[in-house]
């Protein structure tokens, strides 16, 4: 797997920003149109577009995390501001997806044969986006994470092992 800073650099590229904002635009467009259930066919199309954007975004994230995407060796160093912006954009996207799903649910679109499946698929993207946010936050704290693993290794070497059932 690629180093955390290299992965974070990939996430901060303009292509990544375009993907995040493309998904956010699609989700926001959908949120506006949900109020008017008269256009169910248009809503169905938009739901599929949002799902396609989300699938592409998460596929890019997974490929980057797994090291399948080439990393740019000449990329600028990661700044705290860039990382914070990336995290905030992903959090905003997650909240927008949750709002779209709840609005559609309130509008009765989960009971409509054309929209129910796409809405259920849309709901599955909320968790992975938040997982990605958590990973970025952890990856940004490399020293703290390294210290935790070093401490765990020392405790293991001293034989200070505990059954997970005892941990609360």
Image (spheres, rainbow, N blue to C red):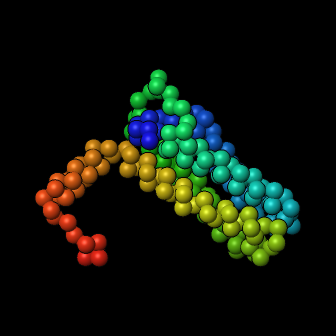
Quarter-of-image position of residue 48 = bottom right
Q: Residue furthest left?
A: 158
**Where does the image place residue 147, in percent across and percent down from the top left?**
23, 49
Can residue 105 be seen? yes
Q: Is residue 114 above or below residue 132?
A: below
Quarter-of-image position of residue 99 = bottom right
Using the image as rendered, state which of residue 158 and residue 27 is in the foreground: 158
Q: Is residue 70 above or below residue 136?
A: above
Using the image as rendered, state which of residue 29 and residue 155 is in the foreground: 155
Residue 29 shown left or right of residue 7 in the figure:
right
Residue in the image at 58% along x and 33% along y: 14
Residue in the image at 22% along x and 69% along y: 162
* On-image quarter of the C terminus: bottom left
Using the image as rendered, state which of residue 10 and residue 111 is in the foreground: 10
Using the image as rendered, state which of residue 16 and residue 64 is in the foreground: 64
Q: Is residue 13 above or below residue 119?
A: above
**Where does the image place residue 78, in percent across and percent down from the top left?**
41, 34
Total marks shown come to: 0
Residue 154 shown left or right of residue 135 in the figure:
left
**Where does the image place residue 29, in percent across and percent down from the top left?**
73, 53
């Amino acid at each position: 797997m690629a180093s955390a800073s290299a992965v974070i650099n990939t996430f901060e590229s303009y292509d990544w920003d375009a993907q995040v904002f493309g998904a956010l635009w699609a989700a926001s467009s959908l949120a506006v149109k949900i109020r008017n259930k008269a256009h169910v066919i248009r809503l169905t199309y938009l739901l599929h577009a949002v799902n396609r954007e989300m699938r592409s975004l998460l596929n890019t994230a997974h490929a980057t995390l797994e090291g399948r995407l080439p990393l740019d060796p000449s990329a600028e160093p990661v700044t705290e501001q860039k990382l914070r912006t990336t995290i905030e954009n992903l959090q905003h996207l997650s909240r927008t997806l949750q709002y779209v799903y709840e609005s559609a649910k309130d509008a009765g679109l989960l009971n409509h044969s054309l929209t129910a499946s796409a809405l259920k698929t849309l709901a599955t993207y909320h968790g992975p986006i938040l997982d990605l946010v958590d990973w970025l936050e952890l990856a940004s704290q490399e020293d703290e994470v390294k210290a935790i693993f070093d401490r765990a290794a020392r405790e293991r070497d001293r034989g200070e092992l505990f059954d997970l059932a005892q941990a609360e």
